[in-house]
Image (cartoon, rainbow, N blue to C red):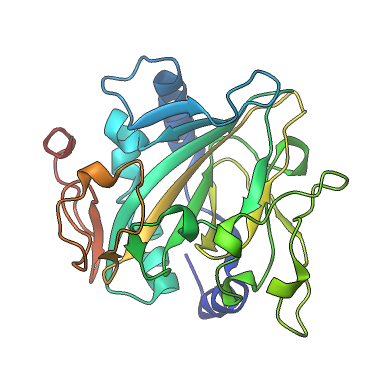
Amino acid sequence: MLSEQDVIFFQENGYLPARPLLTPDEVARLRERFYAILEGKSSKKPEALRNLYGDEENIVIQIVNAWEADEEFYRYLFHPVLTEAVARLMDTDTVRVWHDQIQYKPPFKGGPTIWHQDHPYWPVIQPPDLVSAWLALEDADVGNGCMHVVPRSHHWGTYDGGTVGIREEDWGPAYDPAFVPAGETVEIVPCPVKAGEVMFHHCLTWHGTPPNRSSRGRPGFAVHFMPGHTRYEPRSGHLIEHHITVKPGEILQGDYFPLVWHNGPVTPPPWQEQV
């Protein structure tokens, strides 16, 4: 899936534009199962299903750990082409899933996602070496709220708690120039992703998504992958922390954090045993 030049580009820029992954039939099946979860028709429940804004004018529906709710999403975590790509981007022989999430921006009322870094929102794991794979379940473009990134920002450290903010006048990041290294520029790059394609970003890359005022919905499925050396280091709480069974300082592992690559593809254990 990835060339050596792709890996170098990711290391330098902190993101990788969309690459084909699923067939039309495969992504259609995941899209169908997403709507089943959204409508409460899945056989099990996800960890969370909520509107991040809490109002009806700006709606961003977040589903955390769709893999708990539906076997199709669980099996996707183990996709051998995907997990090999992530292992190469993280330069690791072991890959586990931290958690997944669907963010759905409905037509006309889809809210923005504030500019931020991911890792500061995960204050129970170290070091910040995770990579997220963002799969489009429907075409995502500038018109309906695709992701935008700031190249190279993953090299700049943690930004003031991770929240970069939004400039209302142009939907750019409302950053403090003091956080930008000398000689660097804050360049905003849109990352359109067609249904069935996947893009990647580092957990310290500045990113955000504009509102969706189009007539098209924008469901995206992100899996946050962690390398094998990720440790449980709690500083404050997290939604899924109650599933962690290791002690502080130990490698984060366990059935709730599926092992999906270990010197090669991993065969998924039966879904029923995992949930």
Q: Where is residue 58, by image quadrant?
A: top right
How many numbered marks does the figure carry? 0
Question: Relative to residue 211, is residue 201 drawn left or right?
Answer: left
Identify the residue at image location x=70%, y=40%.
145
Residue at the right extreme of this rendering: 169
Identify the residue at image location x=76%, y=61%.
188
Question: Relative to residue 102, is residue 241 drawn left or right?
Answer: left
Above or below, comparing residue 13 to residue 57 in the picture: below
Q: Where is residue 63, by image quadrant?
A: top left
Tell me, yes or no, if residue 70 can be seen here: no
Question: Relative to residue 175, is residue 83 drawn left or right?
Answer: left
Above or below, comparing residue 136 to residue 132 in the picture: above
Percent across and percent down for residue 76 are 35, 44
Question: Relative to residue 267, is residue 77 drawn left or right?
Answer: right
Tell me, yes or no, if residue 224 can be seen here: yes
Quadrant (top left/top right/bottom left/bottom right) for the C terminus: top left
Residue at the left extreme of this rendering: 273
